[in-house]
Structures are given as C-alpha cells and as structure tokens.
Image (cartoon, grey):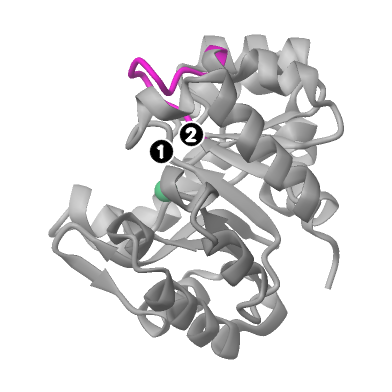
Amino acid sequence: MVLFDSHIHIGQFRDLYSTPQDVFDFLTKVGVDRFAVSSTTTCEGDYAKVVGELKYMQKLAGNRMVPVLWLLPQVLYDGTIERMINSGINWQCLKIHSQLHPEFWKTEEAQADIVSVAKEMKLPLLIHTGEWDGCYPEHFENTIADNPEVLFILAHSRPVEQAIDVMRHCPNAWVDCAFTPPVCVSKMIKCGFADRIMFGTDYPLHNVFYAGENMEDLYHKIVEEIKGSMSEAEWELVSHKNFERLFGKI
Ligand SMILES: [Zn+2]
C-alpha cells in the first residue's frame, strides 16, 4: 500500500519535543512513503530553530518530505517571509492556524494578506479549521471563492458540514483528514469529494493526546479506519494520488 501523510509535525508541542529523527523513524516504521511537515516550534516564534529542524528533516527524507511554512500573524509584516524564502528550504505549502489567532485570521484584511503571499510564492494554503469561532471553514469561504487560482486545504475538515459546503461552492477547496472522525470522512466521500481529500494524521501530537498508547498500533488503526470509510478506488486517491497531484511526483 502506498501511503502519504499530508499532516505531520516536528518540533516543540507543549511538553513534547519531537526531533526530525524521531518522526522520520516513526514514519518509516509505519510505512509512510511521503509526508508534508511543518514545525510546531513555530508557535514559539523561533523561525531560526524551525529552519534548522526542517533542514535536518530534509537531510533525512530528501524529496520524500514536503516542507510546509507555517506563518504567524506578525511575520506577514516583519521581514520573516523574505528570510524564509531565502532560507534554503524549498517550501511547498503555507499554513495558518486560525485557532491560535482567531481574531486576526477572521478579518478580511489578514486573509487578503496571506493570500497575496500564497499567490506570490505560488503555493497552496493550509488553514487549520475546527469547531471554534474564528476557525470555522465558513469564515474563509469568501476568500476561497474570490481566489480560484489559489488552492486551499481545510485541515481537519471540521465541522464537516461546513467543509462540505465550502467544497461544494469552491472547486479550489481541499481538505485533509487529520483527527477527522471516519464517519465525517465517509460523508465527504459520499458527497463526491474523493479527489479533494488527503490522508493526514497530525502525528506526533498523538503522543500528547493519547499518551501511554502504542503509537504504531494507533497509527495503523487510524489508517485502517479511514481506509474503511471508502472504496479501494477512492482510497487510492486519498492515500496518495491527490497528494501527488498537488505536490508532484518524485
Ligand atoms: Zn497539525
């Protein structure tokens, strides 16, 4: 089975520090061939550390990794983006976290500013979505609809009814299924969106949320449950073909 994970992290998350080596070894063990990765160290605002972590991962994984540049609100305006463009990392996706800064990302101005970065860098934009005011998919629908040339990925596809609505209205809206309940994935599949859903897990955050569990078993269980919510042909798309269509073949 070919398996790509579109939502992976390295770095500091609460009390957990996951080195690129830890995460790379784990992904290799569970049979993940390619992955998109951002660093949760970003939340500390230490972009020099983030670059170091991603370069280390690049050394380990080469082109099997898709580096994701996570942008905090302040770095849109302080020269960090230019430094990141010149960092030597071949960024292939941008990310924003609307739950960490809901008031900011909710505004039309902030959304216009991040979209102009995505256009300039010609990269897709991953948006954290969830069940909190400020990170509902519908907050971003106008921006997504107004910018058909940019591809948007609604991370976690939550709440799923809204993710479905946005996908219905906007062909440039995709989702990942990190922490998405299989029943919700199955709903999106039934609506005909198999070609816009990417498998993803948010690993290694499970070490915090499911401390004490066997991570390999847990990962395999997640794969089996998501796989079980669709047909073989749809799983081909979700497990790796959509990822390949977006980030290219290697
Ligand atoms: Zn995540």
Asked if residue 178 is among those painted magenta in the image, a careful observer would answer no
Identify the residue shown where x is 49% and y is 87%.
56
* Residue 224, placed above or below residue 211: above
Tell me the quarter of the image containing the C terminus. Answer: bottom right
Q: Residue at x 75, y 51 (%)?
A: 123
Of 46 and 66, nearer the camera is 46
Q: Residue at x 78, y 57 (%)?
A: 247
**Can residue 134 be found in the magenta stretch?**
yes
Taking the image as drawn, is residue 31 in sight?
yes
Q: Kindly check if marks 2 and 1 are in contact, taking CB atoms under 8 A apart as contact.
A: yes
Q: Secondary structure at mark 1?
A: loop
What range of the chain is rendered magenta? 128-138
List x then y, in percent, for residue 26: 41, 74
Q: Is mark 2 within 8 Å of ligand 1?
A: yes
Front residue of 12 and 221: 12
Residue where numbered disc 1 is placed: 179
**Where residue 161 sits in the image (x, y, percent)?**
54, 9
Q: Look at label 1 and name its amino acid.
A: Phe
Asked if residue 147 lies left or right of residue 228, the reply is right
Horizontal and vertical percent position of residue 109: 57, 24
The residue at label 1 has a CB less than 8 Å from ligand 1: no
x then y, percent, for residue 167: 71, 18
